[in-house]
Structure formats: structure tokens, C-alpha cells
Image: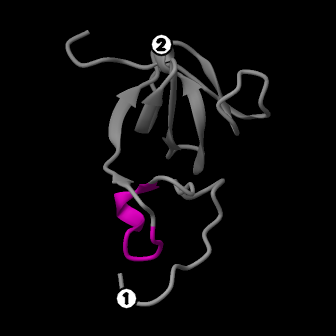
Amino acid sequence: MLGASVPLDPLHNAVRPDLADVRLADRVFAPHYAASVPRIVVAATPLRQGSDVASNALAELVVGEVFEVLEFAKGRAWGRAPGHDLVGYVDADALSWPGK
């Protein structure tokens, strides 16, 4: 990256103070970058703004949608729902796993 980071809306761009989508590396500095791993939604689940299950629901992801995971932690997955152009958290159990 050349120059300073560009402010990005974290609701639509997978960027946090500690982690960012590697596809944003040319626009934002982050201590760590991750490449997204596409998973399929296998059980309808809310896309939440925060990791807490009581956090504001941004959208409802339905079976068959793609969710691009950047981090798994404590039973939650953080990433991007490209069909909604939103970034947030979902229940990790609602996503497909390789070989299943």
C-alpha cells in the first residue's frame, strides 16, 4: 500500500482495527489480513453487526447463500455476505464445512 489508509465503511467492507480482507490491502492498513473462505449457508441465520447474539440483525441469510468467512472465533464467523453487500457475524454452525 502506498500512502495513508482510506476510511472504509465497516458495514460494507470487511475491515476491523485488528483484521481486514486481503482484497482491501491496497486501500487500508491492518495488522493482519485474511483471505476469505467461501462457505454456503446450510441453515437460515441472521447476519449480525456484532459478535454477540443480541447484536443488531442486519439481514437474514437463507439456505444456499454464500458467506465469505474471514475469521472463526467462539462459535461465530465474521465475514462478508456478498449477496447483501454487508459485513457481520453469523453462527458458525449455520455454514457448510469442507467434506460435509
Against 44, is 16 above or below?
below
Location of residue 8 (image quadrant)? bottom right
Give the residue drawn at x 56%, y 79%: 6
Query: Percent x, y for residue 61?
Result: 59, 27
Label 2 sits on residue: 93
Give whichever of 36, 19 is nearer the camera. 19
Q: Is residue 69 left or right of residue 50?
A: left
- Please state which amino acid type lies under the numbered disc 2: Asp
Give the residue drawn at x 58%, y 46%: 87
Against 42, is 56 above or below?
below
Label 1 sits on residue: 2
Q: Mark 2: which secondary structure?
A: helix
Q: Residues within 10 Å of mark 2 (few under 14, many from 20)?
A: some
Dot 1 or dot 2, earlier in sequence:
1
- Please state which amino acid type lies under the numbered disc 1: Leu
Give whichever of 55, 59 is nearer the camera. 55
Q: Quadrant of the N terminus?
A: bottom left
Measure the alpha-carbon separation of dots 1 and 2.
39 Å
Query: Percent x, y for residue 20?
Result: 45, 56
Please report the bounds of the magenta region as a residue range: 20-29
Q: Mark 1: which secondary structure?
A: loop
The mark closer to the camera, 1 or 2, is: 1
